[in-house]
Image (spheres, rainbow, N blue to C red):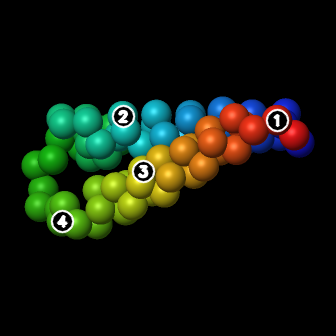
Amino acid sequence: MSTFLQILQLIVAIGLIACILLQMQGAGISSTFGGGGEFYRSKRSVEKFLVWITMGLVILFAILSIALLFPH
């Protein structure tokens, strides 16, 4: 069971790193996929979704970290 939690924590950590890197200033999704941001786009769409995903991954990472503290 501990090995499963460690693998799950590693996957969550990689997802968390990816979400944080996508939110960096000047490295948004529009520039990631080749667009320079010349067109109007709503900041409340993808960026807001990424913020919610990041918060969920942080909470999941914290829960997994606490769960791995206790021996099984």
Instruction: Give how far apart the Cα atoms at labels 1 and 3 are.
Output: 28 Å
Query: What secondary structure is marked by label 2?
Result: helix
The secondary structure type at the circle numbered 1 is loop
The amino acid type of the residue labelled 4 equals Ser
Q: Amino acid at mark 2?
A: Leu
Task: Tell me whether circle 2 and circle 4 mark residues in contact (CB < 8 Å).
Answer: no
Question: Can you give x and y, in whole percent of width and height, for residue 27 in the image?
Answer: 25, 35
Question: Image height check: is 12 above or below 59?
Answer: above
Marks 3 and 4 sit apart, C-alpha to C-alpha, by: 19 Å
Name which residue type carries label 3.
Answer: Thr
Residue that numbered label 3 is attached to: 54
- The residue labelled by disc 2 is 21
Q: How many marks?
A: 4
Label 1–label 2 contact, CB within 8 A: no
| CA–CA distance in space, label 2 to label 4 | 19 Å
Residue assigned mark 4: 42
Instruction: Tell me the number on the disc at residue 71.
Output: 1
